[in-house]
């Protein structure tokens, strides 16, 4: 069997933990399996590198930022190969260049395009454990790129697809995918299985366990993922196309406190306005989530949308730069908002799911700012101070607790 194993920053945060992970991989290797390990940077080191950069330049060039960020993962792969060597197993570390992992050119948010598998396959044939840097790639200029925060998951899934791996295991510091973040909702429960679509919504909504693009890619290539703890041997959660267990109405509640709401007030109520606003934002690479347009009145209308803390400043800037073209009266930002979402394939065939969520919020006297829905998701925007209370109320209302 060829197994891809990905370990996150916490799992390789100290030399002791690196040695533990090495032992765990070696156990599997000694069963005769081929092992490819994908690693994140140790502990908080990516955050520390970002901090370091900002001490010399408040707006560091994105290309140089990626040169810096890729060093984090290089440290962990080298450390892991050394730890395995000390344990008497042949291992080799490879960075994005050595593999090579080809990406699109945007620094900081590149997408993987193609992975050359020859070098890895060659090393595996030589019975080495192959340890690959997560999160990074190389673009057509032969520059380093990174895949966005949390991108190592995507590296692992892409490798599993490219190598036709038999399993892709994502090891993290939690026991699997939960019905809600246990730090926010104490009685959250671990799921045995979840579908790609549900996981994708949860990941996109900030559930934190998996990088959303990794789920997108797993679905596209049919890579079955197992999310499990690197600290214990509990079973984890399987992410796949279809789940066998009796479908619950909803699978999870997600809270995203990074949301910001931006409003354009007093736009002309004529065709093409929404197009121009969101075209400008798209060209500036700004991800927009919930969108709300008011009914036109006296020839004007308002458009509000949510984006995340990282993009809000950029969004405001392009909208201000384009004030003349867009012809709005004023621009408004509210940062202390949060998105609370419920996700579940079960809601497709069950009316009343949204009403049940709204009732739970009403019972807690929580006001809803904006609402958006899809076939398997309902999202509300509320005041950030109410977010945790809302998540618990909704989680309880749907009987998700154990
Ligand atoms: N080290 C990167 C980050 O902290 C990538 C990852 O951990 O997946 O975002
Ligand atoms: Mg992660």
Image (tube, rainbow, N blue to C red):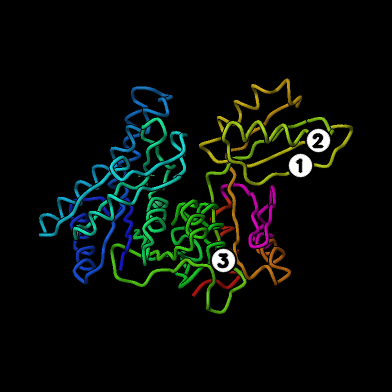
Residue occupying the point 28% across, 55% down: 121
Q: Secondary structure at mark 2?
A: strand
Front disc: 3 or 2: 2
Q: Quadrant of residue 96?
A: top left
Residue 77 part of the magenta segment = no
Asked if the residue under mark 1 is in contact with the one under mark 2, i.e. CB atoms within 8 Å, the reply is: yes
Q: Residues within 10 Å of mark 3 (few under 14, many from 20)?
A: many
x 37%, y 38%: residue? 138
Q: Which residues are magenta?
A: 361-385
| Quadrant where the N terminus is found in the figure | bottom left
Residue 305 x/y as whole percent: 67, 41
Element marked by disc 3: helix
Q: Position of residue 114 (x, y in %)?
A: 42, 46
Instruction: Find residue 45 and report its horizontal and vertical position in percent.
Output: 30, 41
Choose top left, top right, bottom left or bottom right for residue 60. top left
Q: Which residue is mark 1?
A: 293
């Amino acid at each position: 069997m060829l197994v891809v194993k990905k370990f996150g920053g916490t799992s390789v945060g100290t030399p002791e933990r690196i040695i533990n992970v090495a032992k765990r991989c070696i156990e599997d290797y000694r069963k005769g399996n081929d092992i490819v390990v994908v690693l994140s940077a140790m502990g908080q080191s990516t955050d520390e590198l970002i901090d370091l950069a900002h001490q010399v330049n408040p707006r560091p060039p994105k290309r140089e930022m990626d040169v810096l960020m890729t060093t984090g993962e290089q440290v962990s792969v080298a450390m892991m190969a050394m730890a395995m060597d000390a344990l008497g197993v042949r291992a080799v570390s490879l960075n994005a260049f050595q593999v090579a992992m080809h990406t699109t050119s945007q620094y900081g948010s590149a997408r993987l395009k193609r992975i050359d598998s020859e070098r890895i396959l060659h090393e595996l044939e030589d019975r080495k454990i192959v340890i690959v840097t997560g999160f990074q790639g190389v673009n057509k200029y032969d520059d380093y790129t990174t895949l966005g925060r949390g991108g190592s998951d995507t590296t692992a899934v892409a490798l599993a697809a490219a190598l036709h791996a038999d399993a892709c295991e994502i090891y993290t510091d939690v026991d699997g995918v939960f019905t809600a973040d246990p730090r926010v909702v104490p009685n959250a429960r671990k799921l045995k299985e979840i579908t790609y679509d549900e996981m994708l919504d949860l990941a996109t909504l900030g559930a934190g366990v998996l990088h959303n693009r990794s789920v997108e890619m797993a679905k596209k290539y049919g890579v079955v993922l197992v999310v499990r703890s690197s600290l214990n041997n509990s079973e984890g959660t399987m992410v796949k196309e279809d789940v066998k267990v009796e479908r619950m109405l909803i699978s999870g509640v997600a809270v995203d406190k990074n949301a910001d709401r931006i409003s354009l007030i007093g736009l002309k109520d004529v065709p093409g306005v929404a197009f121009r606003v969101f075209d400008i934002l798209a060209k500036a690479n700004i991800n927009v989530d919930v969108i709300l347009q008011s009914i036109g009145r006296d020839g004007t209308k308002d458009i509000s949308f949510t984006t995340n803390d990282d993009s809000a400043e950029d969004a405001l800037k392009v909208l201000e730069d384009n004030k003349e073209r867009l012809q709005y009266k004023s621009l408004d930002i509210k940062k202390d908002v949060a998105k609370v979402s419920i996700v579940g394939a079960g809601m497709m065939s069950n009316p009343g799911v949204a009403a049940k969520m709204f009732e739970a919020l009403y019972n807690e006297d929580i006001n809803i700012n904006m609402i958006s829905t899809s076939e398997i998701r309902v999202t509300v925007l509320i005041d950030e101070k109410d977010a945790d209370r809302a998540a618990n109320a909704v989680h309880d209302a749907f009987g998700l607790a154990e």
